[in-house]
Image: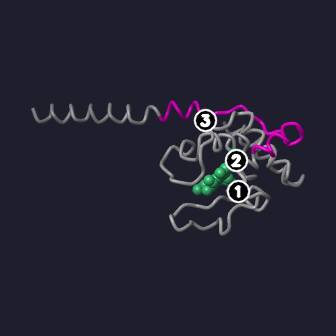
């Protein structure tokens, strides 16, 4: 009888884990975006400049300089907004990552709790507006960094 109870418990445990983790597995598959930043598309970059000014500059800086002491957690233990210019690490990430991060927030991407000050723009901006803001950011980087970033995109697509 005891054995029976143990197996029932085991079954519950397994089913429980499956139901608990399944949504994140399914969601992960959905977390893909077939987008590319277009820093040479002047119309898009102009739109992005406006979107950036109205939605991002308050934290990431009017000149993309980020917040002060951005490498250290603030008094609440949260990280300040990093710069989007070449001194930050925005250009280390692929187009897809930057887009998903802006649209859904970091927690959805890493699939775990990570309290931070960056809002998710899912319900605030259209996909085109997000791509525009990020294209504007890319358009401010030097040609060397832009080419480096193109390579990062190629590598990240190969890893899929
Ligand atoms: C309320 C402040 C705030 C606003 C507004 C904001 N961000 Fe952020 N952003 C942050 C913070 C804080 C982080 C760092 C999060 C962390 O890693 O803890 C961040 C990180 C990022 C990153 C990741 C950078 C990297 O190198 O990992 C991207 C991309 C980004 N933001 C884009 C945007 C865009 C685009 C907008 C406007 C549409 C925007 N953010 C608006 C606070 C903000």
Q: Give the percent coordinates (x, y) of residue 1.
A: 9, 32
Q: Which residues are magenta?
A: 24-51
Mark toward the viewer: 2 or 1: 2
**SS class, disc 2:** helix
Identify the residue at horizontal 73%, vertical 47% (top origin): 54
Image location of residue 138, percent across then percent down: 81, 48
The residue pinned by badge 1 equals 60
> Does the magenta portion include 3?
no
- Residue at 36 percent across and 36 percent down: it is 17
Disc 2 target residue: 55
Identify the residue at horizontal 63%, vertical 41% (top origin). Answer: 121
Q: Mark 1 vs mark 3: which is more N-terminal?
A: 1
Q: Which residue is mark 3?
A: 123
Task: Classify 133 as above or below 89.
Answer: above
- 64 up-or-down from 27: above or below: below
Q: Which mark is residue 132?
A: none
- The tag earlier along the polypeptide, 2 or 1, is 2
């Amino acid at each position: 009888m005891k054995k029976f109870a143990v197996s029932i418990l085991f079954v519950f445990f397994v089913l429980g884990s499956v139901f608990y983790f399944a949504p994140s597995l399914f969601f992960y598959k959905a977390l893909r975006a077939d987008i590319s930043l277009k820093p040479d598309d002047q119309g898009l970059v102009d739109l992005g400049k406006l979107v950036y000014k109205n939605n991002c500059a308050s934290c990431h800086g009017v000149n993309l300089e980020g917040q002060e002491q951005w490498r250290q957690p603030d008094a609440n233990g949260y990280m300040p907004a990093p710069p989007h210019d070449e001194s930050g690490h925005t250009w280390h990430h692929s187009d897809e990552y930057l887009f998903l991060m802006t649209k859904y927030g970091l927690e959805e991407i890493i699939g775990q709790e990570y309290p931070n000050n960056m809002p998710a723009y899912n319900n605030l901006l259209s996909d085109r507006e997000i791509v525009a803001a990020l294209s504007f950011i890319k358009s401010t980087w030097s040609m060397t960094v832009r080419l480096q970033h193109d390579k990062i995109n190629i590598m990240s697509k190969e890893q899929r």
